[in-house]
Image (cartoon, rainbow, N blue to C red):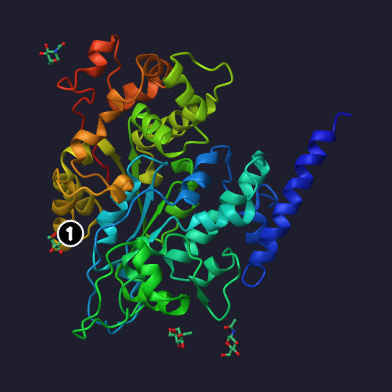
Amino acid sequence: MQCSWKSVVLLALASIAIQYTAIRTFSTKPLSLLCSVGLAPTGHAVNCSLRDLSRLGQETLEASDQGCEEIPSPTPSSPSVSLPPFNASKRTHILILATTRSGSSFVGQLFNQHPEVFYLFEPLYHVQLALLPRLAQRNLAERRVMLGAARDLLRSLYHCHLNSLENYIRPRPANHSTDKLFRRGASRSLCTPPVCEAPLGREGQTLVLADEGECVRRCGPLNVSLAADVCRAKRHAAIKTVRIPQISDLRALIEDPRLNLKVVQLVRDPRGILASRIETFRDTYRLWRLWRATGRRPHNLDLGQINTVCEDFLRSVSAGLAKPAWLRGRYILLRYEDLARFPLQKARELYSFLGLDMDHSVEDWIINNTRGSSDLSSRQKFTTVRDSAANAENWRVKLSFDMVVYTQTACQPLLELLGYKTVFHPRELRNLSHSLVEDRTFLPFF
Ligand SMILES: *[C@@H]1O[C@H](CO)[C@@H](O)[C@H](O)[C@H]1NC(C)=O
Ligand SMILES: *[C@@H]1O[C@H](CO)[C@@H](O)[C@H](O)[C@H]1NC(C)=O
Ligand SMILES: *[C@@H]1O[C@H](CO)[C@@H](O)[C@H](O)[C@H]1NC(C)=O
Ligand SMILES: *[C@@H]1O[C@H](CO)[C@@H](O)[C@H](O)[C@H]1NC(C)=O
């Protein structure tokens, strides 16, 4: 029957749209809801610009479940702040657009460490979990709904309406209090006063929260209302996400003049991403490990896993480099390898592009976390990079030559665009004194 697949898609779409409708009914005007789920009449004045969201790979859920990207540096607690009034006009909203294992936690820290930035680590995790809990369901219509929901939530979060997030948290928070916020401990603002008045130590000092787990243990449930107050009191807000595939997915937000959104697109050599994912997402990338171990490519290898990364990067970066008017002053491209080699310089460039003053606490954090440090403990397996320059290219000793050739063939146009050199011989691959990262400057445009 010719229309059967359509019925299936429609049915799936309806069910997820109903979930989303239920989530949104308290605040949404009917038209914007239809728009959000991609059902608004075409030609209507409202800008829906919904597009293919076929990119949300399985790894984005797996990544989250493992919670393994990093353990942040100690977060010194600051004295209680008195909260000044919300000043929307001066606010800059920052989005770190990234993919898993591309160094996004590290970039997130460049903002998390700033005392005037309210930082959220991967809040869209809750959207994905609430709307697409089953990984098997990966059809376009559902992803469109999710992307619409993700955009709506981002807009709310930048405006500090953190209760919008509560709608996606399971179990649903009662009395604006939850202990289920994903990776709460990665956000300094949520682990320091006034959101977290950690118990007093013996000397009457507020305890320094050394890591994410300690934040969660000591701070008790998160008071979402209080967190929203703090969000309003900070001058800027930054959100990191690996759940938005391409820059064009953000166009409606970027064009919203009230939002003043600036996007830091983080890219990394796909060969490096692959090597890192193979280590981290052991189930999803099982066949790649098999390839590495046996030297033979499994016939049922999921090529989509790396193709998706390269396609998304290629489309986003091409869009950015074409300098369209809607990205003017709002887009900066950052190669992870450059950040790893010149962390302070690159951080300063980011801050300068954003028009923000770089606080000394950010510099201190960079210096503490990028020198080759001898105090590596085992729990830092997933930390932001120490001795970062060496780490950025260590995929060259972790992937087999075949895997490298395979990946660079699939991603050839992207490698050229970003200035990553292809290798033609194993000797060239393993010779680390010969860098595969061309010197390139990607300047923002205004
Ligand atoms: C929420 O607050 C109300 C009134 O303060 C209280 O009666 C109720 O037990 C609280 N619910 C939960 C789940 O804490
Ligand atoms: C949460 O913070 C608000 C202030 O924003 C306060 O009024 C409320 O009592 C707090 N709730 C709890 C459970 O502490
Ligand atoms: C940097 O490291 C020193 C020594 O370990 C520590 O006292 C300081 O608080 C750290 N600063 C930051 C911003 O992490
Ligand atoms: C490694 O690369 C460097 C720089 O390109 C070159 O001078 C050197 O001969 C190479 N070593 C080997 C063993 O190929």
Q: Nearer the viewer, residue 296 or 118?
A: 296
Q: Is residue 428 visible?
A: yes
Report whether 171 appears left or right of 293: right
Q: How many marks?
A: 1
Of the four image quadrants, the one with ligand 3 is bottom left
Find residue 191 and report its horizontal and vertical position in percent: 34, 70
Q: Amino acid at mark 1?
A: Met
Q: Classify mark 1: helix, strand or loop.
A: loop
Residue labelled 1 has its Cβ within 8 Å of some atom of ligand 3: no
Which residue, as the protein is rendered here, is positioned at the far right?
1
Report whether 159 appears left or right of 351: right
Q: Nearer the viewer, residue 217 or 182?
A: 217
Residue 310 versus residue 413 in the image, above or below: below
Residue 309 found in image quarter: top left
Residue found at x 43% / y 14%:
295
Find residue 218 and report its horizontal and vertical position in percent: 37, 74
Q: Nearer the viewer, residue 245 or 155?
A: 245
Find residue 88 and report its horizontal and vertical position in percent: 36, 71
Report whether 322 appears left or right of 36: left
Residue found at x 89% / y 29%:
1
Report whether 248 appears left or right of 72: right
Residue found at x 35% / y 39%:
102
Residue receiving disc 1: 358
Residue 74 found in image quarter: bottom left
Q: Is residue 410 visible?
A: no
Mark 1 burial class by Cα count in 10 Å: few <14, some 14-19, many 20+: some
Find residue 17 and report its horizontal and vertical position in percent: 70, 55
Residue found at x 29% / y 47%:
378
